[in-house]
Amino acid sequence: ERKYGSEEDPEEVELPLYDFTTISAATNNFSLDNKLGEGGFGPVYKGKLLEGKEIAVKRLLSNTAQALSEFKSEVKLIAKLQHRNLVKLLGCCIEGEERMLVYEYMPNKSLDFFIFDESRNSQLDWQKRKQIIDGIARGILYLHQDSRLRIIHRDLKASNVLLDNEMDPKISDFGLARSFGGDEIEANTSTVVGTYGYMSPEYTMDGLFSVKSDVFSFGVLLLEIVTGRKNRGFYYQNRLLNLLGHVWRLWNESNLLELVDESIVNSCNLSEVLRCMHVGLLCVQQSAEDRPSMSSVVLMLGGETINLR
Ligand code: ACK
């Protein structure tokens, strides 16, 4: 059961504490030249460690006592994450008012950059798309399922999935992640954080989040990867029955171009695309209980038939 989720054990990890001068010199004192962008926490810079390794440095802007304590507990949480589909935290830096997280550098930017740009989108054939979807699913399964982690990411979206040298996906930005521990399956929050369009209805409306809110976001992401169209979770959700009713018609007419990005049609197995979309549609269902767990998602993506009830 835990085959995919915990291939690497989240043992207590000794995290290197980097010296501020090393990092600030390495990142050229945080100039605009080496800024990669804005993350959930604050700006992200590209840098290099003294031994030459390329890094991404997330610099936290808030420096209240509360923020520091949150930072520390988050670092502890993130340090335990060891999975090939999660961006690896290499260390951190706390000095004076500075709080920084040092990550491995991902040279191929985020998924967002590839799927919503026409010419780049066409570089991704079906096989690669499917590998990306499978990788993301396994990364989330690892977060949810390992009893020592039990983490809900809460902000899964295309811009939080980075691509490595091989164009394999790594989930990033755990700033909003929460550990749900014990048997607690659903929690309530008055501060809803996340990204509209990827957030489940119960989270958007009532601040309720659970592993099933991540499943919803994953469904939106999956459908984006297959169709090349942004943020259509609610669109597909409302059209679920309609769509499923049309699937066989489309299948027979080979008219999938309407639904699926053109670049993947030539290179793929249509039944696999349909199966994959079906999984996405199950994930974006209105009711959280109707959505599959991530372990079912991984099995279904692998071609296994699951009884959801
Ligand atoms: O889409 P991007 O190029 O990839 O822009 C965002 C930006 O920083 C704010 O999150 C990029 N980014 C974040 N973490 C990393 C990393 N580990 N390696 C490379 N780029 C990163 C992200």
Image: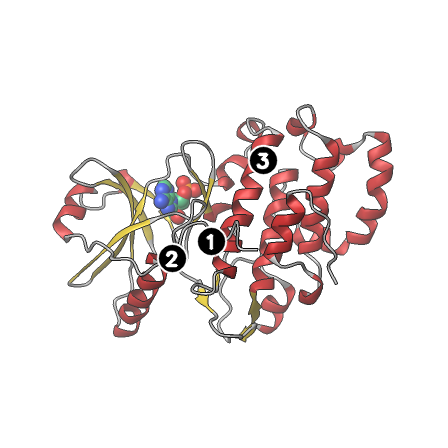
In the rendered structure, the answer to whether residue 308 lies left or right of residue 189 reads right
Q: Is residue 66 left or right of residue 25?
A: right
Tag of residue 32 = none
What residue is shown with label 2? 10
Res. 37 image quadrant: top left
| Residue 197 shows up from this direction | no
For the point 26% across and 71% down, which residue is it?
A: 64
Does residue 21 appear in the picture of this structure? yes
Q: Which residue is the site of mark 3? A: 129
Q: Residues within 10 Å of mark 3 (few under 14, many from 20)?
A: some
Residue 29 in the image: x percent, y percent? 18, 45
The amino acid on which the numbered mark 3 sits, given as a three-letter code, is Arg
Numbered disc in front, either 3 or 1: 1
Q: Nearer the viewer, residue 214 or 255?
A: 214
Amino acid type for the residue under numbered disc 1: Ser
Q: Amino acid at mark 2?
A: Pro
Q: Which residue is mark 1?
A: 6
How far apart are the alpha carbons under marks 1 and 2? 8 Å
